[in-house]
Amino acid sequence: MAKVHQFDVIVVGAGGAGLMAGLYASRGAKTAVISKLYPTRSHTGAAQGGISAALGNYEEDKPEWHTYDTVKGSDYLGDQDAIEFMCNEAIEAVLELEHMGLPFDRTPQGKISQRPFGGHTNNETGKPVRRAAHAADRTGHMILQTLYQQCLKNKVNFFDEYQVLDFLIVNGRAAGVVAIELATGELHTFHAKAVIFATGGHGRIFEVTSNAYVYTGDGAAILLRHGLPLEDMEFFQFHPTGIYKLGILITEGVRGEGGVLINGKGERFMPKYAPTVKDLASRDVVSRAIYTEIRAGNGVDGKNYVWLDARPETINKFAALDGRLNPDGTPYTITGEQVLQKLPDIIDFCRVYLGVDPITQMMPIQPTAHYTMGGIPTNKFGEVVIDDRNTVFPGLYAAGECACVSVHGANRLGTNSLLDLVVFGKHAGLKAAEYAKNADWQNLPGDADAGARSALDALRNGSGKENAFDITVEMKKVMFEDVGIYRNEKGMRAAIEKVRELKERFKHVRVADTGRIFNTELLNAWELGNMLEIAEVVAECALNRQESRGGHSREDFPERDDENWLKHTLAWHTGGKTRVEYKPVTITKYQPKKRVY
Amino acid sequence: MKVTIKIFRYNPEQDKKFHYETYVVENAHETDRVLDLLEHVKGYNDGTLSFRRSCAHGVCGSDAMRINGHNMLACKTLVRDIGDQITVEPIMGLKVVKDLIVDMEPFFDNYKKVLPWFISDAPTPADGRERLQSPEQRARFDESTKCILCAACTTSCPSFWASDDYLGPAAFVAAHRFVFDSRDQAASERLEIVAETNGLARCHTAFNCTMACPREIQITQAIGELKMATVTGRVE
Ligand SMILES: Cc1cc2nc3c(=O)[nH]c(=O)nc-3n(C[C@H](O)[C@H](O)[C@H](O)COP(=O)(O)OP(=O)(O)OC[C@H]3O[C@@H](n4cnc5c(N)ncnc54)[C@H](O)[C@@H]3O)c2cc1C
Ligand code: SF4
Ligand code: FES
């Protein structure tokens, strides 16, 4: 019999979203945060560039501009009420982080410093605006540290290195979760009135990715298995500049400082695709341009990568050609020393992983799977909704990258994710605590952990004919190639077939490790099961959507089609079959128009 | 290329004592991370091999281990840097739980002892805006904000091997982060904590920590600044 714990609110995940939720929920209810990693290992710590808010610390800025930019960036698939809500809350959210002690960089006047980022503009001039509040190129790290420290200060309960395997539903309400304690292999049942999922994304279904090993879509997969839908799963962001083969992210900031993309023939190619903003077009546009070059045989040495050139002489040459100026009207130039100063971690990554010094050499890059736009459908209070009428599932909440509010729609703007975590993490925490105050306890059945137990048993009892590692490699490859940046019907059908075959083969996996203590093989296999389910749903939703929008680019349907496709996808996956329905997009102020950069 | 990797193995449910196991990875590349090799061995040679990892690019602090005798992150150490004969062992001074996984609790307990959270009773500005801090004040503690709590420093320190109630360099770095933040008001409390018997006095400036830090934090210098502050009571 599993150990049983009782908390009003359980938060699953201790990244930015989970910690914020935990902090706020614990003020009004008995709360615990469960995480498969030590909280400070969460992927929020990898975020580099910044968190957006119209603070206007250098120049005029307004939440309305931030709202419009986000709507446009989303290719009009984001829900405008939620976007407006987030952008209005942004200022207070970032100031709250500062009040918690977050060491933001400072302006000469001592205010929070801000930098420009792709897609964030002054709506009157169309020029980039400095909206991203930053702490060097490790803003996410500072957010994660600060929130964890605040949780320690406020004595939030943590269950570190406990992996949640199942969600408990009693009488149609949330009733808790089941988790395995990694250090002992013991199952624990967490009886709760409210459960908040904040488990992050699923970028690990793709071969080349900036995402951590643990990004296996656990929360989304668990809910899918319980018959709940996922929203907009076809939308995944491919960031243009990942380190070749490794996928490690090179921030947009490099191009912000003047870096340019160069193909195998030595040509700067972005002006062909985005004549006005060139290398600083939005992420989906740049990633497609790189792939188009590669397909035309213009990759370096015929391979699938191009160069990112941030050598000062290159930056200065193109800045002069483009007529780029400093704020005071003088021509824009940069020195090697300044590049080093502005992008210390990036330079370090290149030196360590490529043996390349970006000051004197070009960086080999290719697009990398980066951000999960789709996920667990919620409203703007973090409440999980389960149909096209936005019916709330009592006691269940989600926030952060695993959730789909939807504020990012078909394409997320850089720096809007960290904002999303803080704003919706907070509201999910508040709502959950409020709900728990009034809700009754649901009685748990005696065998609450039966589902988790049988899932693990299945992995121990396969025939052993198949190797989990092989299945992982094959899944990632087919998803990256056929459900990646460019998609077409033939490729996606083949990918769906392949993933189904892999799911069959997965049944024959047998975990060799029979131990209890840190059985990482068992848990990795369980995660692979999640990824296979998610991969299938992603591919099926993508095949269904017969248009191109934001991160979803169909070669056979190259245009956006608002008449038929201005709607969210909802996908259920039960009994091995995916069912797809749609729900309307909330449009308040901004009617869709053509998106040009 | 062919790489030989010798790995410390210990399964508490089966073994009385640790041993080493040697594996050959045939199609390794110069640019492979030690972490890639470990994943390969786990995937194809022995699924029971256990280690922690997450980000795979040196920013989450999960996979500090002893690689050819030095504390490093497996994901930030390439075959190119260390050659084709590799030995991997757990970091020292913390109890081995299984293979390369150690019990991190004493490490985090030490971290928590220095009150690693922002403390200030001063009211936030009346207009609701940020507290002001000059770029120079901010730069004062920049180094120590980089810490990812990987434990490479603390577990390279002879004083910590001698006893794990020694606060250790990572906890000092955390203290430094707040003591020298112009907005924080609990410097004296923290300085008192790091000046206790299990604190700064047991640092013999061995420099191991600074050598081990994958974030290249100047730890010895930070410790020196703390020592100075405990003496002078000043934290400029
Ligand atoms: C390299 C990189 C750079 C980025 N830069 C930026 C940027 O500059 N600005 C920006 O806005 N966004 C950026 N992003 C995106 C942003 O960082 C992420 O979207 C965000 O941090 C996700 O936060 P989260 O709280 O949802 O999840 P995470 O921080 O990943 O946390 C997930 C948590 O869930 C836990 N968990 C998962 N599964 C389970 C389970 N089964 N049981 C128990 N616990 C579980 C994990 O342990 C972890 O604690 C970047 C992303 C990457 C990869
Ligand atoms: S100071 Fe450096 S070595 Fe020590 S825990 Fe922090 S990052 Fe790791
Ligand atoms: S896996 Fe994150 S630091 Fe190595």
Image (cartoon, coloured by chain):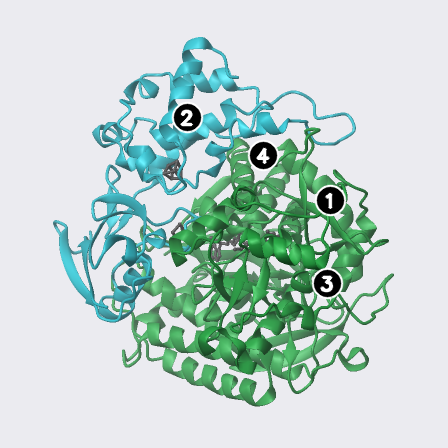
Chain colours: A green, B cyan
Q: x%, y% of residue B70?
A: 24, 43
* Eye-nearest disc, 2 or 4: 2
* Eye-nearest disc, 2 or 1: 1
Judging depth in this view, the residue of A207 and A81 nearest the camera is A207
* Mark 1 neighbour class, 10 Å CA radius: few under 14, some 14 to 19, many 20 or more: few
| Labels 4 and 3 within one chain | yes
Residue shown at 81% from the left, 46% from the top: A62
Judging depth in this view, the residue of A207 and A221 nearest the camera is A207
Q: Which mark is residue A330?
A: 1
* Eye-nearest disc, 4 or 1: 1
Q: Is residue B226 above or below residue A41?
A: above
* Chain ID of residue with mark 3: A
Q: Is residue B231 above or below residue A435?
A: above
Which is nearer the N-term, disc 3 or disc 1?
Answer: 3
Q: CA distance from mark 2 to mark 4?
A: 17 Å
Q: Which mark is residue A73?
A: 3
Q: Is residue B66 above or below residue A252?
A: above
Judging depth in this view, the residue of B71 and A86 nearest the camera is B71
Q: CA distance from mark 2 to mark 3?
A: 44 Å
| Labels 4 and 1 within one chain | yes
Residue shown at 31% from the left, 46% from the top: B72
Provide the secondary structure element on which disc 3 rests: helix
**Image quarter in which the N terminus of chain A is found:** bottom left
Three-letter amino acid code at disc 4? Pro
